[in-house]
Image (cartoon, helix red, strand yellow):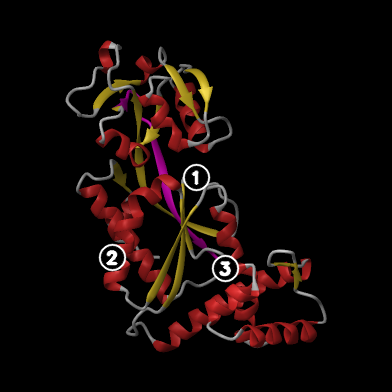
Amino acid sequence: MDLRVLRVFLAVVEEGSFSAAAERLRIAQPALSLQLRKLEEELGCQLVQRLPRGVAPTPAGLKLLAHARDLLARAAAARDDLRGEAAEPTGEVTIGLPQSVAAMLTVPLLSRVLAELPQVKLRIIESMTGYIPDWIREGRLDLGMVFRADVGSGLVLDHLLEEQLFLIGPVDSPVAPLVPGNGEIGHVTFKVMMHLPMILPGVPHGLRELIDQRARRSGMKLHVVAEVDALAQLPAAASAGLGWSILSFTSIQEAWEAGRIGAWRIEDPAITRSIYLCRPSDRPGTQAVRAVGDLLRQVLETLVQDGTWPATLSGEVQSGGHL
């Protein structure tokens, strides 16, 4: 089975059309169609089905998809190994980031990759964290960032940092302990939040489960008046005076810096969220993947140490661990 034909098959499935795949691979569409047809003849089964708009993999195609991604990843790793570590990292690296993390990481990470890894084509996909582990297992992502360690088998997780969570609410809060001061981030105890009308994500959202867990440990119960899973809308609801919420700084930074909401650091007990870098355990990372992973760690360290990201680095990051 020719690896070049597998790349054709993979491009057709991922792009969802022959024309887009041909453009991606920079080959003529008739030649691409011919290669795929020969692959189907070789395997004795139909791999893609033509739809009114584009194409989709058949059940046999889905089976081949996993093998194709694995074989191509191993071939790339073997090529890197034979070239030696002195060679410049080359190739495409795809990383999945949760929305809140993407808001903080995309620009500085992209800037470093463009400046220091000119032969690497970085692709950043913003997604809900629930999809990221499966996409890594399927080979759609090389790396991903998640908030939970219980993501199932076939993955290796590196603990990167502990991210602080903040109470947000209207700037002109009438609650005495929560009067904001000149755009500064205030402080609030968990006990005070019991008396506030809260708007939180619904169960089983990971952030809601974390908040409820902390409340139970403290023997307290929050007054939840509404549930909104669209996290980007929670600062808007707080700004409108509809209620209070709990989010990471990466989710509220823009609204807080613009003066639309107030923000308070939660104490006694504090609420933090773990962030992990996730990679496949059964596929060796290419030199390009390892290089991007190292740059990501460096960017995180800089953001935390200069105070841009209110978080605590794990011991692995502080000691400069590698993928």
Q: Where is residue 191 in the image (x, y as percent from the top left)?
A: 37, 16
> Of marks 3 and 2, which one's residue comes earlier in the chain?
2
Please give left or right for residue 66 compared with residue 136 in the image. Answer: right
Instruction: Pick out the residue farthest to the front.
Output: 52
Kindly state the secondary structure of the residue where label 1 is placed: loop
- Mark 3 → mark 2, Cα distance in angstroms: 28 Å
Q: Where is residue 50 in the image (x, y as percent from the top left)?
A: 75, 70
Instruction: Give the mark toward the camera: 1 or 2.
Output: 2
Please give left or right for residue 136 compared with residue 287 in the image. Answer: right
- Mark 1 → mark 2, Cα distance in angstroms: 27 Å
> Of marks 1 and 2, which one's residue comes earlier in the chain?
2
Q: In which quarter of the image is the C terminus?
A: bottom left
| Amino acid at pointer 3 | Asp
Disc 3, disc 2: CB below 8 Å? no
Image: magenta residue range? 264-282
| Amino acid at pointer 1 | Arg
Disc 2 crowd, CA 10 A, few/some/many (<14, 14-19, 20+):
some
- Mark 1 → mark 3, Cα distance in angstroms: 20 Å
Please give left or right for residue 288 compared with residue 175 in the image. Answer: right
Q: Where is residue 94 in the image (x, y as percent from the top left)?
A: 47, 65
Residue carrying label 3: 282
Disc 1 crowd, CA 10 A, few/some/many (<14, 14-19, 20+):
some
Instruction: Pick out the residue farthest to the left.
Output: 182
> Of marks 1 and 3, which one's residue comes earlier in the chain?
1
Residue carrying label 1: 148
- Whether residue 253 appears in magenta in the rendering, the answer is no
